[in-house]
Amino acid sequence: MRSEGRIAMSMSQIRTRFAPSPTGYLHIGGLRTALYAWLFARKNNGAFILRIEDTDTGREVAGAKDVIFSTLRQTGLNYDEGPDVGGAFGPYIQSERAHIYKDHAEMLVKCGAAYRCFCTKERLADERAKAEAKGEAYTYDKHCLSLPDDEIQRRINAGEPYVIRQNILRTGETTYTDAVFGDITVPNADLDDNVLLKADGMPTYNLANVVDDHLMGISHVIRGVEYLSSTPKYNHLYRAFGWEIPAYIHLPVVMKDKQRKLSKRHGDASFDDFIKKGYLKEALINYIALLGWSPGNDQEIFTLDELTAAFSIEGLSKSSAIFDVDKLTWMNAQYIRALTKKDFIDRAMPYFKEAGVEAFDLELIADIMQPRLERLDEIPGKLEFLKEMPEYDLSLFTHKRMKTDAAAALPVLEQARALLEAQSDYSLDSLKEALLTLTEKLGIKNGQLLWPLRVAITGTEVTPGGAVEAACLLGKTDTLQRLDLSIRKLEETKNG
């Protein structure tokens, strides 16, 4: 049997769908699929539908549906139809559509495109073991295909469990066209008679995705490349029902590195994980869009509207894309720096609260930190010194390039303390000018004053900005108190 798939452009409206399973947080690969489906629909004035594929009840995670809803809204990928917004083609949760699948499975049995299978798990396991022992790929042997009608009815009446399997001819081949990968041909002998309806009455993906995509009017099926070789068996179902085959757009794999796929089963980060790490949702969406798609030019930073305008199927790649966290982090830094000061403070507020600095001058903190951050979760660690002066070792004063150490720091800090006590204007520019004037007066390099001053008032060698910024954030009183403590510490070491 040979069937020809075709790009279904005849439908009156382009309709795409995102159909995740509620098995946890929304993974990066899944979010990219949703993004491309959303962009394609919006670019073509179409509709974007959310459908929840929850027929594998054993893997469902409590609350995962709500995570999917909130993530799509949070990222701006609003859907036109879905479980929580309704629509003309619902229900949009597969577990609520069981009767629909059962009816369609029975239709397939009546026309010979499917059959009832009573094989036990033990028989199937035994047959699989025999195939593996011969080094062969296991496919079901159609053992139940030719059961007489009276025997089938007798076994049903006896309450014997059964599944409904797809009936695929073993001869010939099936070809269809994918918008990214071109013509795909698969020998029918490679297509197994997979289960369509399980013994508990719930469908498998093989049946449910076809029935739902047709009944919901999906014109373009956008999904991962892992479905590329199994799509022919779905097309056999479309033809058995007499339905139009949708357009297929299969997406390349997102890789963790050159050898490993990015996978939530292997604990790789989800969208929510990255948000908690201080990445901005806009940066994530922007970066994910470029994992397997190119705008055809050197532009890298896109708003969602710009992505919509630029997106095209022609820009999709056949090659897998490697998720480069360093590149994402670079992009996130660009987004942080582009925020207005108010927006930066609003988004950073949870981290300011974590650092316990919400009572400080947040606008000043923003001025100092915003140009230097790559991720928002860096904030608490960089601002720890503001809450309390940590214990530190005098070796921190040693800086070979600056040619300074604890002994050289003491007289310099005494001069700095006198200057800072006399300073009435504690603004950033004023402090900087005063301290640099002092270095000229003392005939030393800027770093020979600023390095020991930063250590003396923060107890650390890494702060947002340098000594001037730290002194400005601390304010005059705290700066002088900390300087006094450090000077005493240096004097005690010198004298003792």
Image (spheres, grey):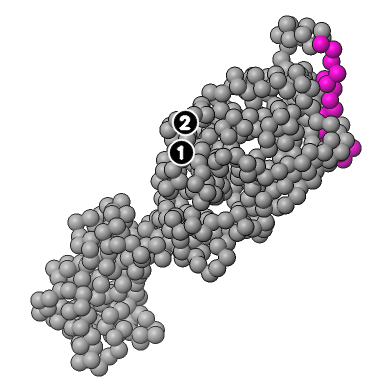
Q: Where does residue 446 sit, x and y in percent of width and height?
A: 29, 86
Q: Is 135 one of the magenta-colored residues?
A: yes
Which residues, given as a range, are shown in magenta?
Answer: 133-149
Q: Where does residue 401 sit, x and y in percent of width and height?
A: 39, 85
Q: Is 142 one of the magenta-colored residues?
A: yes
In the rendered structure, which amino acid carries the disc numbered 1?
Asp
Residue drawn at x 27%, y 62% is: 341
Residue drawn at x 58%, y 34% is: 217
In the rendered structure, which amino acid carries the disc numbered 2?
Gly
Q: Where does residue 218 sit, x and y in percent of width and height?
A: 59, 37
Most extreme residue toward the right is: 134
Residue drawn at x 59%, y 29% is: 215
Q: Residues within 10 Å of mark 2 (few under 14, many from 20)?
A: some
Left or right: 420 with respect to 319? Answer: left
Residue topped by disc 1 = 80
Left or right: 6 with respect to 327? Answer: right
Instruction: Name the magenta segment's main secondary structure.
Output: loop
Q: Are marks 1 and 2 in contact (CB under 8 Å)?
A: yes
Q: Is residue 164 above or below residue 184?
A: above
Residue drawn at x 71%, y 8% is: 159
